[in-house]
Amino acid sequence: MVARRELLIGAGALAGAATLVAQAREAAAQSTDGSTMDRVTSTKTLRISAIVGAEPYFKKNLGDGTWSGVGVEMAKSIADPLGAKVEYVETTYANSILDLKSGRIDLVFSLNPTAERALSIDFTHPYYLHPYCFLGKDFKATTWADANKPTVRLCASNGTLPDALVKRYAPNAQVIVTKTIDEGVLAVQTGRADAIITAALQALAIKVKNAQFQSITVPTGPRIALPTCLGVRVETSPRWTNYLNAWIDYNRASGQIMDWITAELAKGGIRREDIPQDA
């Protein structure tokens, strides 16, 4: 009986020790995995993705190399309470997730969360509900049904949400698939397409640079709007994501993010009433 009791006590001690080891490992992981907040606060530098041509979020002055745009104002506001400066790491949307995972940057702007992306990175709360639209010279369609005709030529970038949308909601239309949005712009300019399907803020930024594009319509039946989030690394510690979510919730609810969007587009003559409001 004594031997059995000693075995039970020994087994309990081993289990307790194993629990303590597991807790210690978890604590150690949290102290090292919480690297983004630790790194930003210790180096006083916030490294963000900066993408040429991703207006109104990012615009690079080719003369002096400085950056402006909605993403720049957001980044400065995120960094300020941390006493950090913003460092701009030039990248592309295609490479930004790889840059984030490798630790080259701390934050990616203007991402729509998808299941595929969520396998690689985490996302914050949405900071804007971004509708998709038809962008053309004088395109009259106001619903998907209007565009769902064999005589209509719609342009979408290959493998993107617009590509999937036109195949689902306007299968009878002619689809012109391009590699980039710039190729779509050229297709409309040269008369090979009637309209591009793209995100509304991007469409407004295109309109600023191309006076030919006078028609921007968010189609109904259905109205498609996706959450736009910040991309962050997958980490054990939630501190960085929690901080960003608190920042987003406050600045979205107070209207500050919409004010930044409005101010940037106003530089190109876009009126507030022309900008789809967050909903």
Image (spheres, grey):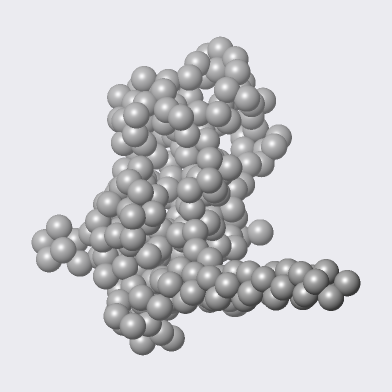
Q: Looking at the rendering, which quadrant does residue 72 occupy?
A: bottom left
- Label count reads 0
Q: Looking at the rendering, which quadrant does residue 255 occupy?
A: bottom right
Foreground residue among 113 and 253? 113
Extreme residue toward the left, this view: 63
| Residue 159: percent from left, percent from top | 46, 29
**Point 41% across, 84% down: residue:** 82
Extreme residue toward the top, this view: 150
User: Is residue 13 among what the camera can see?
Assistant: yes
Q: Looking at the rendering, which quadrant does residue 273 occupy?
A: bottom right
Foreground residue among 79 and 240? 240
Foreground residue among 217 and 140? 217
Horizontal side of residue 10 vs 70, given as left or right = right
Foreground residue among 16 and 96? 16
**Point 12% across, 66% down: residue:** 64
Q: Quadrant of the C terminus?
A: bottom right
| Residue 187: percent from left, percent from top | 34, 26
User: Is residue 248 among what the camera can see?
Assistant: no
| Residue 276: percent from left, percent from top | 57, 55
| Residue 68: percent from left, percent from top | 29, 66
**Point 56% across, 12% down: residue:** 150
Q: Quadrant of the N terminus?
A: bottom right
**Point 50% across, 16% down: residue:** 174
